[in-house]
Amino acid sequence: MNFIAWLIVLSEIGFWILILLGLITRYILKFKRLGLFFLALTPVIDLILLIATSIDLYRGATATKVHAIAAVYIGVSIAFGKSMIAWADIRFQYYVMKQGSKPVKRYGMDYAKDYLKSWGQHVIAYLIGAGILFGLIYFINDPSRTEVLDGFLKLWTLILGIDFLVAVSNFIWPKKAKG
């Protein structure tokens, strides 16, 4: 695996470590501001990954799937980051601190509406990631070195469309509770 691939893996690990540090600091150690500080550091990881990817390409590397995945990762991290932190916060409070109410499982129209909201976040992730991909393609200005980025953009557009169809299908065939 190359450097950027490892950096993506480390970024994901770092993201969850910062969230865990933030939640432990906030709830167990009772340092709310320090906990918020750790949670607020999560976008810094994205910035480091963006800079490293850009430098790698600027130095002459031919874009690979890993570079494209870095752009996707950054878009997803920014668009879904706040909701992922909220998801972890609710579960940490309930399962670790034994506080709050049990995390809600959604069904029917409630699930369909929540999934549609998630699809909206996917659109935001797409716009951010696609913006990065377009920026890298423009920045490099060499189609032979950015062909993979263009292909990933087309693939992600298809995936976004399929995700929209899934979102709509949840309104037609609502998810039912098991049992």
Image: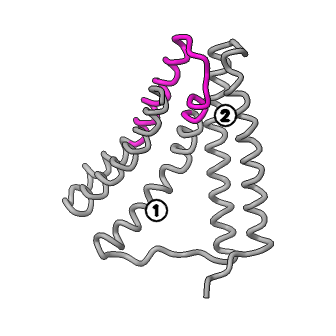
Query: What residue would you read off at disc 1?
Result: 87
Q: Quadrant of residue 41?
A: top left
- The residue drawn where x is 54% and y is 13% is 58
Kind of element beneath mark 1: helix
Amino acid found under the numbered disc labelled 2: Ala
| Residue reaching furthest to the front | 1
Q: In the picture shown, does residue 58 fall above or below 48?
A: above
Amino acid found under the numbered disc labelled 1: Trp
Boundaries of the magenta span: 42-70
Kind of element beneath mark 2: helix
In the rendering, at what x and y percent does residue 72 appear? 59, 38
153 displayed left or right of 55 = right
In the rendering, at what x and y percent does residue 18 appear? 34, 47
- The residue drawn where x is 31% and y is 57% is 23
Q: In the picture shown, does residue 61 fall above or below 6?
A: above
- The residue drawn where x is 76% and y is 70% is 171
Q: In the picture shown, does residue 108 fall above or below 61?
A: below
Q: Of residues 157 and 120, which is closer to you in this image?
A: 157
Find residue 69 and name its label: none
41 displayed left or right of 170 = left
Query: What residue would you read off at disc 2?
Result: 130
Dot 1 or dot 2: first in sequence order is: 1
Q: Of residues 64 and 119, which is closer to you in this image?
A: 64
- The residue drawn where x is 66% and y is 34% is 130
